[in-house]
Amino acid sequence: MAVLKGLAAASLIASVAGAGGALAQAAAPVPQAQTASPDQATLATMTPEQLRAQAQARIANPNRPTGWWAETVSQQPDAWYRTPEGLTMTANILSWQDSTGGWPLMNTTRELNRGDPAQAGPWGSDGALIKATVNEMRFLARAYRATGDARDLAAVRRGLGFILMYQYPTGGWPHSVPPPEGYERYATFNDDMIVDVMTLLGEVANGGDFASLPEADRQAAKGAFDKALDFILKTQIVVDGKRTAWAQQYDEVTLEPRAARRFEPVAISGGESVGVLLLLMSLDHPSPEVRRAVREGADWFDRSRLSGIRFVRENGDGLVRSDPDAPPLWARYYEIGTNRPIFAGRDGIIRYDLAEVEQERRGGYGWYSPAGAQVLTAYAQWRQAHPQQ
């Protein structure tokens, strides 16, 4: 199955790249210069002032990532894609598609790609899967429906080929593509990447805005979705014979939980597991394996809530304060086995009290979240629709 999937991806890319004539030329991306973020060893030696300056530079970039699709575009009618604004945005998005079919982690809607590294920002202009590519494909699928411009459909097909090409045989996708050495090769749930990609694949398989794609493309999307679902079921962490939730990332071959950056240890993730469970609960006709994963995952969230504390950010710091009236929170990381919240700074040392982590990391990372409440609310409804047999 993995070999067939790889061939399907290659076929999609080749069929578009080899179309010839005006289509192949129009769909070709602008040559792109690359930029790079500091590696982890460099980050570990940077001063708090240097780290803050880097963060501020990202914020200052006019093409920094935003929620452009959900916030401003997703509700536009077909007629809007034929307006000057819609056509300009389409051209901008097309110009940022890279030679492998993906789009970079940035706002690709604002301006044409001029090949200037400063446009793309610190993540560079290579195609990416974390908060990238999926919304460009959604946009262009609707643009094609509205205008019939073959360049839009060709770009969507190349985007799908990009996603299929980088899916691991075990079902996940790497943090960065092409997979480098180090943690960025791991299959990752970080920033909801696998959930976002699977949601898009489900939309492609079901038709809808993607109904213009060839049937073979939509079947390939379904196969990739099913393989990723198998990955989810195999990677749910089991402690004392009971399923819990998921780690942030996994070895792409052995499916063992792995650490990423020095402050991202091997752990059960109370953050990334939210999206995984919400995805599982969205499935029609869930299998017995999916039902068990949902029930035991929701039970873990119920047992792992933290009450009586509030996480606040003040003056660049992250502080935990006692508050008996605060809504429940969930830690980003729980120690496998003890289920205790754990924290780490750029030195990689595991700590059980956030106050022991350096200020730059205390205030610069999402250590707590209320999002587990979404799981429990959704589960209450899901359980009524899927009573235990």
Image (cartoon, rainbow, N blue to C red):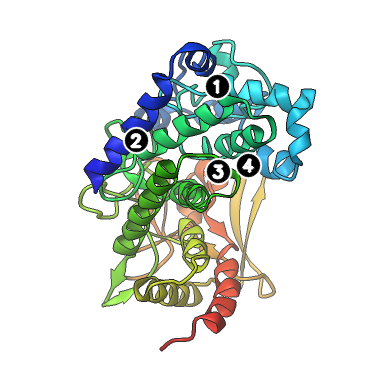
Sequence-first disc among 1 and 3: 1
| In this rendering, the label closer to the viewer, 4 or 2 | 2
* Crowding near the residue tagged with mark 4, few <14, some 14–19, many ≥20 C-alpha atoms within 10 Å: few
For marks 4 and 3, give the CA distance: 44 Å
Q: Which residue is mark 4?
A: 316
Q: Which residue is mark 3?
A: 210
| In this rendering, the label closer to the viewer, 2 or 1 | 2
Query: In the rendered structure, which amino acid carries the disc numbered 3?
Result: Phe
Query: In the rendered structure, which amino acid carries the disc numbered 2?
Result: Ala
> Quick check: 200 above or below 100?
below
Residue 172 appears left or right of 121: left
Sequence-first disc among 3 and 2: 2
Q: Residue 34 versus residue 25: which sits nearer the camera?
A: 25
| In this rendering, the label closer to the viewer, 3 or 2 | 3
Sequence-first disc among 4 and 2: 2
Task: Tell me what residue is drawn at x 60 percent, y 55 percent.
Answer: 319
Query: In the rendered structure, which amino acid carries the disc numbered 4?
Result: Gly
Residue 322 location, quadrant:
bottom right
For marks 2 and 1, give the CA distance: 20 Å
Q: Disc 3, disc 2: CB below 8 Å? A: no
Q: Which residue is mark 2?
A: 9
